[in-house]
Each structure stands twice: as C-alpha cells, then as structure tokens.
Amino acid sequence: MQVQERFLRYISIDTTSDEACANCPSSENQWKLAQLLEQEMKELGLSGVKVDEHCYVYGFIPANVDGAPAIGLIAHMDTADAVPGGPMHARILRYAGGDVTLNAEKGIVMRAKDYPSLADQVGKDLIVTDGTTLLGGDDKAGVAEIMAFCEYVMAHPEYKHGKICVGFTPDEEIGRGADLFDVQGFGADFGYTLDGGRANEMEYENFNAASCRVLVHGFSIHPGSAKNKMRNALRIAMEFNAMLPASEVPECTEGYEGFYHLNHLHGEEQEAEMRYIIRDHDMRKFEARKERVQKIAAYLNDKYGENTIELILRDSYFNMREKVRKMPEVVDRAVNAIRACGLNPACVPIRGGTDGAMLSFKGLVCPNLGTGSYNHHGIFEYACVQEMEAMVEIVKRIVAAE
C-alpha cells in the first residue's frame, strides 16, 4: 500500500483529542485508529504488537544483523481541536501554482501569498480538505510514513537493520502523549518522532513549555449600587492580561523568541477564567516568564483582596536540546540520511513541542523529523505526496545498518 493510501485511510478517522477529558485516551475514536494500526502491524508480520490499556500502540521488527542499534520510530494518533476534525473530505490535486480553491461554494481559498510553502510545491501532488476541517497531517502523515516503512522492511529481507521499535501515542496535542509511554518496554537505544513539516528538516530544539490557568474570583452586585463593592472579574482578567508584554505573543514572535499565548477566555462579573501557554527556548527566560505571571497574580491579589486571582501553573515539557547534545550521533545519522536522499538538511528550532521532548527527558533521546505536511492545526493544512514518499526513503537510510 502506498504511503498516500495509508494516509487517506488514517485521516478518515476523526481522532481529535479533548483537553477537558481526564481519560487516556481523551477521545474514543483514538481507540479506532489504534486498533486499525494494531491489525495492520500484525498483518505485516511485526512482532510484539499490542495496544495497551491506555491506547498506546507498540510493535517491533527484530534485528537481522548484529551490532546495529535499536532505533525507535514514533508518531501520534490524535489531532488538534483548533478546528473540526471531521467528517473529512480530502482530495489529491496536482498543484500548478497560484491560489487553491478548497471550497468554491463557501469561498474558501488557500492563497499563495499567505502560504509561501506553496511556492516549492509546483508540479507536486497535494492532499487537501474542502476547507471545513483540518486534514490531520499532524500527525497522521508521520503514522503513514512509519507504516509504509514497516511494509517495505517486511517485504525486503535483504534490507539490513537492527531492532526497529514502533510506537504510536494518543493525546500528544494536549501535552500528554508521552505521559504513559513505556520507555523501558519499548526497547530502543534512541528514537525519532515523525511530527514535523518539511521533509528536509531536523529538529532537536523545542520550547520549554508551561500551561497557566488564571481563575478570577470577583464579587457581583447590581451596578446601580456597585460603588466600592463590586469586583468585576472580567475587568480584573483584562487587567491581568494587559500587564503582560503586548509584543511577546505568537503573532509577533518567531525563531527562538518566546511568548505568552492566551488561548481561552470566558466568564462574567462573578467569575472569569483565562488559559495561557507559556513558551521559551531559553530555560532562564522561561523561568522568568513564569515568575512574571506569579508576580502579576500577587500584585492583583494585594490590590483587590486575597485569593482574587487563583493561579495554576504547570510545566508541560522542556527543551530536548539538553539531552540530545549528549548523543550527537543521533542527529548526525538523520542529517546524513536527509542529505543522501538529495535534500539540503535544515536543523531548525521547533516553535512547539513533540512527544520526543518528554521522551528525551524520560531516557529515550528522540529528536524530530519532518513529515511533508504543512499549515497544521488549521483548515489550510495540506500534505505533499512526494515529500511523504521522501520521508519513507529518509527513514530507510536512518535505520539501515551501517
């Protein structure tokens, strides 16, 4: 089965994760994809195939040569909830340049001027949606590439390799993908997540990340008699947000620049809630960002009364660079494979995170590879068939016994 066929099969299952659900997985449809992958892995002949009680999928291909490292390949099954995940209406088109009309009836157009990556796709085959849902390239492109690679290995006994460890995780999009991953049982010496963008990109620097939940406890009273009595939770929430640097937000930053991102806001005079994600590549700056929100909370509590602001601050993951730099051969292996496939390797910082970040801190050094999918978490997401095929070739070269 070609990689694009696998991809189209997997994206047909809506696996949107749900941060409000404490279960693992956070959405039932993740079980459907996990069970499909389990079935396919068994049909291909992988060993030790199982879906555990938390919806993690594991399997391996035994080594057929001595002395080669055991290499892990990991992708996540869930998709983000920023836009609807289904029902999916995908199609493949040969890109001739210019704008792409995804949905003529609704006037949904992916404009070339807004998405510069399209300039490199002329003459290639793109998989797109009808503009009403995301595509699911993040990270079903990675899932499809790993499965296509496994199919190749099982069909070519002459291909020499060490142990190949395969893992698919739930709930990466809500920061829980590596929480219950069985690193020891996985059995890899090191690994790679396939969860990036361009096929030539290699990522081993990611944000340090924290979540910040701000609960504002106000006091509501009739506005006609509110003087010196009302504490308007909405206005206090606005004051909290205004005390953060206006330019240190995602829409004003790039590269290694960190940010505060308000991604949830609701409430009324009595109670309000804001949720932020806090990001920075530099650990010192990251800690300073967390300290800033704590100081703002303390200031407002002093101003409006104790416990007006309730702050729940939680670290999510850390920059894997600290761990990866101790095993430079893992990066070299990927860079050399990308170059051998005729591409110019680019090591870029991740303005986000992957399961690999947390896994690196749990003992499995695990930098990130591209997938050939773009514009993640939105309706203009697309995947390039030729780049997905290139990723399968890159993985072949990474895993091949030297």
Image (spheres, rainbow, N blue to C red):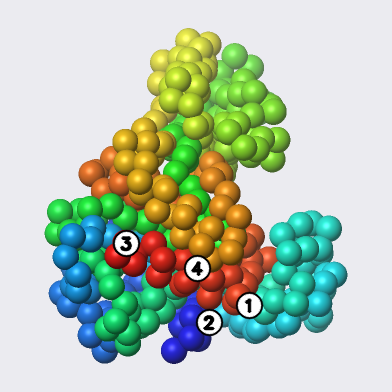
Tag 4 and tag 2, C-beta contact below 8 Å: no
Cβ atoms under marks 4 and 3 closer than 8 Å:
no
Residue 245 in percent (x, y) is at 64, 23
Q: Tell which tag, 1 or 2, sits nearer the viewer.
A: 2
Say which of 307 and 314 sits in front. 314
Q: Quadrant of residue 115?
A: bottom right
Closer to the eye: label 4 or 2: 4
Callout 4 crowding tier (Cα within 10 Å): few <14, some 14–19, many ≥20: many
Give amino acid for label 4. Answer: Met
Q: Residues within 10 Å of mark 2 (few under 14, many from 20)?
A: many
Q: Which amino acid is tagged 3? A: Glu
Q: CA distance from mark 4 to mark 1?
A: 16 Å
The residue pinned by badge 4 equals: 391
Residue 233 seen in this snapshot:
yes
> Do residues under tags 1 and 2 come within 8 Å of each other at their CB atoms?
yes
Mark identifier at residue 402: 3
Residue 258: give x, y in percent of width and height.
57, 31
First-in-chain label (4 vs 2): 2
Amino acid of disc 2: Gln
Q: Secondary structure at mark 1?
A: strand
**Quarter of the image where the N terminus is located:** bottom left
Q: Secondary structure at mark 4?
A: helix
Who's the residue at 28% across and 60% down the image? 71
Which residue occupies the extreme front position in the image? 402
Nearer-the-camera pick, 344 or 27: 344
Query: Residues under labels 4 and 3: Cα distance?
Result: 19 Å
Q: Which residue is mark 2?
A: 4
| Callout in the foreground (4, 3) | 3
Residue indicated by mark 1: 127
Task: Choose mark 3 or mark 1, whichever is in front.
Answer: 3
* Amino acid type of the residue that numbered disc 1 sits on in the rendered structure: Ile
